[in-house]
Amino acid sequence: MKILRADVKGPVRIYVVETPEDLPGFYEFVNDNPFMGFDTETTGGFNWWDAPDNYGCRLAQFGNHDTAWVLPVERGEIYVQAMKWALGKAERLSAQNRGFDLHVIEECFGVDPEPLVKKMWDTKILAHLVDSRGREQGGIGLKLEDLVPHYIDADMGARIKGSMNEIAKDLNSQKEVVGFKARNKDKETLEFRFSEYPGITKEALKSQGLSYIREFQEGIYGKVSKDTVWGKVPLDHEGYLLYAGMDPIFAYRLVKILFPLIPRKSLRSGLIGWEHRINWVTYQLERTGYLVDEEYTRLRIEELTAEEEKWSEVAARWGVQLIGSSAQIIEALVKIGHKFTRDSKRTKPSKAHPKGQLSTDDSVLKSIDHPMTEAILKAKSASKKRSTWFENAYKNRDRAGRVHPGINALQARSARMSVTGAIAAQTLPSGTGYVRHCFLADPGHVTVCIDFANQELRVAAALSGDKRMLEAFANGEDLHQLTADAAGVPRKIGKMCNFLVAYGGGAKALAEQAGIPLEEAKKVVDGFNRTYPGVAEYAKKKAVEAKRLGGIFTATGRWLIVDPGHEYAAINYAIQSAARDITVSTVLDLDKAGFTQYMRLIVHDEIVFSFPKDRAEELTRQAEKIMEFNKQGIYVPAEGEIGLQSWGSVLELEESKH
DNA sequence: TAGAGAGGCACC
DNA sequence: AAACGGTGCCTCTCTA
């Protein structure tokens, strides 16, 4: 057994199991510690679905306040059994982002996560309930490398972040001689590797008429980078073991530190249990994944590659070699005689460019009628579709042809979910089924989408208690038309205004988005405020709360910090967050009713299902009923749409109805 | 040569 | 007085 010592605001010991004889000490530790932090180390990356062939779990770690035990689960079943026993024995566990470790041990070792989630805190959830902001947003952050320096030990943050680079550097520094370099008659340098020329000698080179230069070395672990270090580092590397051993200690300590910081209101609302329950549901969605239509996806990639190539060649005629380069596009625009003026659209100011750069976005290019701009737009569009959606789905398929989204149930500063990875569900083009055709319900199933009607506006109406807006919803009136009529503008502009006000926007933003004069936009916003005075009042009320407390409490007792000077955003946080919690509430109800097996994705106000074809109608009606939200004075109806096998077919059937 | 920053674009 | 909220991913460019 190896024992490592470190200091984390006091002495810390890490016991590293090396042989089965070391296990009794571990058993004793587990028996003495009913509550433990837990963590795993893997071969690297997040593609747990590729286990066991292309993905593996290397270490499993348990810890308390000052002691950790590291099990080399990669080295044999006996250590895996010890891990399983400890997980079962523990009364309480904690982990940072528990879903990841659970996926790993489920895929690699067949551990059933269900009994574990009932007793495992996720420190990421607790951290979010204290401060929902990421580090980029001026918050404490939600990653372990953010939480540790803030809550535990200021020096530790840099060490965690730097440790993988240090380990990689260390491995790269370990080299061995792998061959000779020699020069031939034409003065070309040649490499003779021992692996290709076993038993080669300097003399043998000379006898072939070559002149010997020198031996050459290579790292004994090959080229180790940040991405490959976790799979290559030997299990007895001390820096690695230290890094691994600290994590369960952090997970243990963070629970005790974070709990008292969670606002009383949130505790009373039961948010902790609630967030852990939705986390378990989304875990199951991640694992189930979504079937990919391999042929459809491949054909689209081929088409788009050709399309991009064709239009890129056209753009290159005017000197735009890289269609993604704004600098090249600006230069080419000047060459074809386009005049940039003081009023030309600019990007947002940054450190390097305080006044912003000339913008070359979609709206700018569309306003310039020229074969070059047309070519750039077409090439860019093809490129975006190919790489962001089709290739992403195609390349990330598992052995069964499914892709597994990363669903972060509690992620955004408003608590909204985020969906990452192979299915960028929150960004897929929505107008047509073109991209969504990639995703298929299971064989014999159909895709069904059920979404909330006007979720955020209904929440705005309920939270603000605005009489006219509530009345409009109750009577089934057209809210967008109502806003439009107040200022005598088209419905489309009324709709833009409705959303913009809920986002905290104003006339200036409306003018830009709708392409109307500022004066007219002001009239529309005034019309909105006259029609729904309660909404403006509510916005003010939340802004005052934010100013007074530094943040707001939402309808579910959630604490959201509001940036000073940005109090106008408070209303949006309140609405967006409450809407998210309505979705979560119904997902938990669906789970209770046995629908988790059918759920594929959750996209803000929409849930995507795979239902058996012959029961689709019945299950859809049942799910709609469960999703219909009518609590605490908030009413949000849900409407389902039954498609064919692909997700895209749902959109096309919807389209054909109109 | 990896990473950070910025710009751009897709969504609710 | 007015205030555009929340995401993720890709490409290009510059730098440590």
Image (cartoon, coloured by chain):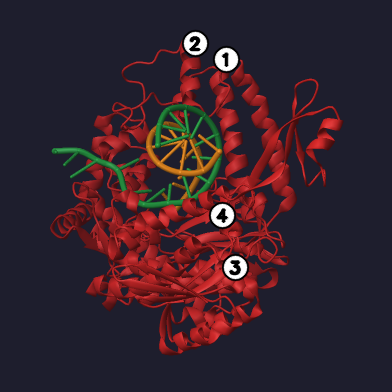
Chain colours: A red, B orange, C green
**Which amino acid, by three-letter code, is at mark 2?**
Lys
| Residue assigned mark 2 | A335
Asked if marks 4 and 1 touch (Cβ < 8 Å), the reply is: no
Mark linked to residue A229: 4
**Which amino acid, by three-letter code, is at mark 3?**
Cys
Q: Residue at x 16, y 60 (%)?
A: A549
Mark sitting earlier along the chain (4/1)? 4
Mark sitting earlier along the chain (1/3)? 3
Disc 3 crowd rating (10 Å Cα; few below 14, some 14-19, many 20+) is many
How far, Cα to Cα, is label 2 from label 4? 48 Å
Asked if marks 2 and 1 touch (Cβ < 8 Å), the reply is: yes
Q: Residue at x 75, y 49 (%)?
A: A295
**Which amino acid, by three-letter code, is at mark 4?**
Val
How far, Cα to Cα, is label 2 from label 3? 57 Å
Q: Residue at x 50, y 16 (%)?
A: A332
Mark sitting earlier along the chain (3/4)? 3
| Residue assigned mark 1 | A318
Percent across and percent down for residue A545 are 16, 59
How far, Cα to Cα, is label 2 from label 1? 8 Å
